[in-house]
Amino acid sequence: MKKFVAGGAALLMSTTLAHAGGLDRSGQGIGAIFEDGNYAEFSFGYVMPSVTASSAPYAGEGSVAQPYSSIGFAMRTQVNDNVAFALIVDQPFGAAIEYPDIGGGAVPMASVETMSITALGQYQINERVSAHAGVRMLNGSGSIDLGAFANDYSSGSGVGYVVGGAYEIPDIALRVALTYSSAISLELDGITVPTTLTADFPQSVNLDFQTGIAADTLLFGSIRWADWSAVTVTDSGPAGELYAPDSDSITYNIGVGRRFSDSFAGSVSLGYEKAQGGLASALAPTDGYFSIQVGGAYTMDNGVEISGGIRYINVGDATAPTGVFEDNSAIGVGVKVGMSF
């Protein structure tokens, strides 16, 4: 039952909508470090958002948020009885906004893509207590077109750190893990126009938990705080400040997983992020969300686990400089293949 949360139970927690919690996408999870022995996984997610304006000039013109995909990879190695090492690759932040072409000039758009590599070590202090720490390299690139100013940016990198600990009671599949990730700043050089884009990505704290509540049944969840109010994205040229959220985000997830047989487990979970109010950014015209997801995991005879699921997200209404956006939603699908060796 310990492996539930590594399969279909929690897969789509990391397939969220880019505009929920600023530009958060993956949630920066480190679940692979808690697998047993040597382990590797690959995941793929695809999100189809519908964020539409209910006011002029974009009312009735279609979604401004564009579909996007995300990939992830992790590998864990058990060095000895007390030490393990994991390498985790994900796409933690991003944006894909393009306003409909209503004529009369350039179409406002923004694209942000990131990739991070986290090298994480774990030390098992005793049967119940462990500590983990490591370094994270974040690489980002992007482009913007605001009509009066447009630019493409070359990729840039920054380095931060990750530190945390966990408490476990294996007999009841209990685990509570607390992880802090430092802020990371990037500087991107303009290609179209010779300016410099400075982008800050937030410090965050993830609290992940799971516990057995009945035979073959697991309760799991997470709370994530991200310091978006300290974030700014600024171009050194005439565009100036492009993105500066007013509020931090706190994202909640809770769910139940159940093993129906030796080879199949299923889950259902809920997610929530409170709306902050105020004026949203034109590059992220949503505010809060509520989600529901179902997932399943099938373990083959050779130990390979295939998990997947689907998530519906009711995205909060928002008012941005480009209009009022209401009745927003998104659907996310994902699949993961994990293998112990």
Image (tube, grey):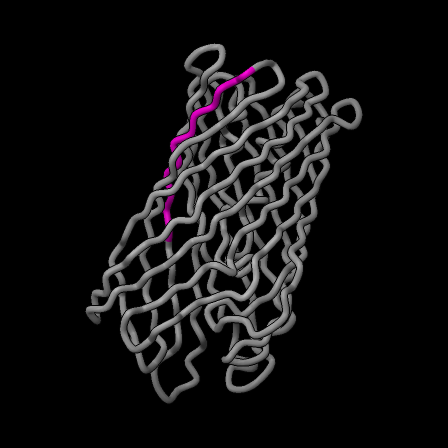
Q: Which residues are magenta?
A: 114-125
In magenta stretch: residue 124: yes
- Classify residue 112 by image quadrant: bottom left
In x, y percent, where is residue 111?
38, 63
Query: Which residue is at a point 42% across and 34% down the rendered structure image?
Result: 88
Looking at the figure, which quarter contains the N terminus?
top right
In x, y percent, where is residue 197?
30, 63
Query: Which residue is at a point 27% across and 62% down the rendered structure image?
Result: 153
- In the displayed orientation, state which residue is furthest to the front: 230
Tell me how many marks there are: 0
Looking at the figure, which quarter contains the C terminus?
top left
- In the displayed orientation, state which residue is furthest to the right: 214
Relative to residue 282, is residue 4 depicted above or below?
Answer: above
- The one of 307 and 189 positioned closer to us in this rendering: 189
Is 53 left, or right, of 159 in this rendering? Answer: right
- Classify residue 323 by image quadrant: bottom right
Query: Which residue is at a point 33% across and 75% down the rendered structure image?
Result: 239
Query: Which residue is at a point 56% across and 74% down the rendered structure image?
Result: 279
In x, y percent, where is residue 295?
64, 40
The prevailing secondary structure element of the residues shown in magenta is strand
Relative to residue 15, is residue 55 depicted above or below?
Answer: below
- In the displayed orientation, state which residue is furthest to the top: 81
In x, y percent, where is residue 289?
64, 59
- The one of 161 and 17 positioned closer to us in this rendering: 161
